[in-house]
Amino acid sequence: RKEVEQDPGPFNVPEGATVAFNCTYSNSASQSFFWYRQDCRKEPKLLMSVYSSGNEDGRFTAQLNRASQYISLLIRDSKLSDSATYLCVVRNTGKLIFGQGTTLQVKP
Amino acid sequence: DARVTQTPRHKVTEMGQEVTMRCQPILGHNTVFWYRQTMMQGLELLAYFRNRAPLDDSGMPKDRFSAEMPDATLATLKIQPSEPRDSAVYFCASGLVGTRRARNYEQYFGPGTRLTVT
């Protein structure tokens, strides 16, 4: 079993839709949580950190449930430019552990 | 705009040949990571260094892979001998960890080296 698990998708949604991605992690001692975005044939880039109280950055909302070891990302009013792979990431000591990623395709 | 740089960007080689990949981390970052990404396994951590000292290389096949940081501006990942199963994209990332200036353990990735071993 992988330490960070995500539904690979793909999620195909129309522009303007709201879409949610979920992720579970197995190590209860994980210390920090993130969502990274990776465009096709590009490097991963930090999208946002995830805080225990939940946090929002524009159209993006991230939530963390430590009891269930569950992380989510909600994208509202999706744009064509949101099409990418979204990587759920947890930090254990100094290392980041990446999920396989969830692919989002936003269609006109 | 500071960036992590990696060379070469693409490498095609024959099985058995030595491959050396280079990375220049962002100036001032104290931690350097090497990752490998494949469709099957996703992004896997191979090794990482803090202040040029190797901290963890448990993700790296020891018999053929080696990682070094000869100075603060250069990290290398070497495969000798290479095998077709090593074909992947190899990313280097750097970050600033454990200091007051550190931000959320964010890692900045280079553009990657796309390796094909035939």
Image (spheres, coloured by chain):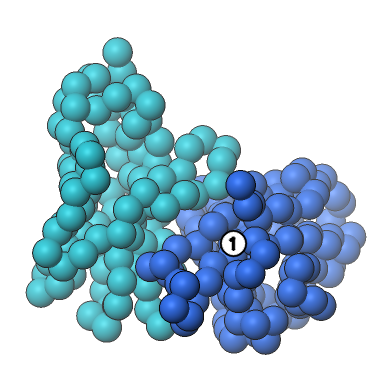
Chain colours: A cyan, B blue
Give the image location of residue B100, x and y in percent.
44, 78
Q: Is residue B60 left or right of residue B71?
A: left
Q: Is residue A39 left or right of residue B80?
A: left
Instruction: Look at the image and tell me in which quarter the N terminus of chain A lies.
Output: bottom left
Residue at horizontal 76 percent and vertical 68 percent from the top: B73
Chain ID, mark 1: B
Q: Residue furthest front?
A: B100
Q: Residue furthest right?
A: B17
User: Badge 1, how many Cα within 10 Å: few under 14, some, many 20+?
Assistant: many
- Report which quarter residue B24 is drawn in: bottom right
Q: Is residue B67 left or right of residue B38?
A: right
Residue at horizontal 45 percent and vertical 63 percent from the top: B106
Instruction: Name the residue nearer the viewer: A17 or B95.
Output: B95
Query: Which residue is tagged 1?
Result: B93
Give the image location of residue A17, x and y in percent.
17, 25
Q: Is residue B45 left or right of residue A68?
A: right
The answer to whether residue B58 is above or below residue A103 is below
Instruction: Name the residue nearer the viewer: B11 or B99.
Output: B99
Instruction: Name the residue nearer the viewer: B68 or A56.
Output: A56
Determine the secondary structure under disc 1. strand
Give the image location of residue B10, x and y in percent.
77, 44
- Report which quarter residue B31 is drawn in: bottom right
